[in-house]
Amino acid sequence: MPYHIAVAGLVVLLAGAAVYTTAQAERQTPQWSVTFDNANGQFAISVVVGTRATSDGIAINLLRSAASLTTEGVRQWRMDPAGACPPDAANGYVDAVERLPTGESWVLRSCYAPGALPQRHELVRLAADGGVLVATDLGTTPALWSRAMLVAQPGGVVALVPHNDGLRWLRIGTGGDVIDDAFTELVGPDETVIIANARLWPNGSASVGTWQRVASCNISPPTACARPASTLLRLNADGSERWRVEAGTFLAFFGFEDDGSSLIAESASDRPLYLRRVSATGVADTPFVAAGGEPINLTGAAGPVRGRYLAYSRTELLLIDRNGTVLVRRLAESAGGTALASGERGFITGALASDGALISSDDLSVLAVFDVDGIDGAIWDSPGNALWSVLDDGTIYTNSRRPSDTAPSQRLARISRFAVPGSPAADLIFIARFD
């Protein structure tokens, strides 16, 4: 079943491992790993569901808690959202995290009463040591809070919150004041909105790609299954809609170029890959056939990196420009798997027998492979739940979990830091910790 993850410059349509040889690649073990458990009364962690990395560390969404680590893997804080919930709350959750270059973090947290009734949604700004600086009560408005996205901006943060019938824009100042609260209506097949990708621009506006997933349908008796819908939005700095492009009835890939333009990609089994360019002012070109019109089952894409995109088609990797020209192609057996992330130093893909691979944005050569198990030899999920962060200095973060490890103490999530060989990040001293 297709699934998604929303981070800047990345959409994974269908994750899967691929077989490839590593004869030319340098295998990397983590510079450090930090493992989280649920000992000492901590909430059990079901999975690391999101990470936000900056040059001085990483903020982690552990679903039932949030945490922050420095670049050396030292824990700065761990926050339990239940502590801020009413006494009769059944559950406290972390919905999203965003780390700032100052070491501060924004955390969106929610409280639910028995029966899953929302009691409180709150956005808090935390100091580098985890102390609460400000807290903003966002009320109990029903929304898809667990799919929310936080994007930092000068003077505050923007919360993009999917609702059943649209997208809410909340701009919060550093003092916790709500500066803008806007709603954009999106009517889809089952009114379930997912943020596929988003990018905030220097002037405060944002490009947002959204999906509306297929409603459930019955096999017996059969009922018609509605098609999904994809929409590209450009929102002003106050959250109002500037323009939109209805991308079509499929789960699209959205790529955002530095000049404010966008690229929409769509493909299905045994069909050509279609691309559609959209200018920064919302002028959408006619969709055109890419890669010479050959059938491509696009199951993952990432980018752009210097105007290039990586597409994975189950059997091979394709390096494509925004004009649909295939610059390089390589069979998966010798390259990698589904595109998971991208940065100035290349693309991250999944890999069998390792957790990820760094792929060159010039010729698709495998520059390095990353093995989370390098410290203790444990078998962890690959490819680290597809959550990777790639920074300009060569730092790479990922998470992995071991769901079969249920005996005390339960090691249910682990954050690992890697470095691109030869990059400034490769100079960090090796450490390992158990939290």
Image (cartoon, rainbow, N blue to C red):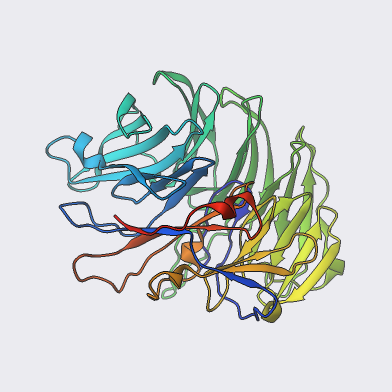
Q: Nearer the viewer, residue 147 or 429?
A: 429
Residue in the image at 52% along x and 32% along y = 152
Q: Is residue 390 above or below residue 78?
A: below
Q: In the image, what residue occupies the spot 70% across and 79% down?
A: 334
Instruction: Choose top left, top right, bottom left or bottom right for residue 21.
Output: bottom right
In the rendered view, does 353 fall on the left or right side of 265?
A: left
Residue at x-position 41% and y-position 76%: 220
Q: Nearer the viewer, residue 25 or 185?
A: 25
What x and y, as percent, mark residue 377?
40, 76
Query: Where's the C terminus, which quadrant?
Result: bottom left
Q: x, y percentage for residue 333?
A: 68, 81
Which residue lies at the image location 70% right of the left edge and 59% below the top edge?
A: 266
Judge left or right: residue 329 versus residue 180: right
Q: Position of residue 288 (x, y in %)?
A: 83, 57
| Placement of 174 over or under 163, stated as above or below | above
Q: Quick check: 230 left or right of 317?
A: left
Which residue is farthest left? 87
Asked if one can make out residue 191 in the rendered structure from this viewpoint, the answer is no
Residue 177 sits above or below residue 369 on the image: above
Left or right of 237, for residue 115 = left
User: From this viewpoint, is residue 418 visible?
Assistant: yes
In this view of the protein, which residue sits in the foreground, 187 or 302?
302
Q: In x, y percent, where is residue 82?
A: 21, 41
The part of the image, by quadrant, that contains residue 329 is bottom right
Quadrant hosting residue 258: top right
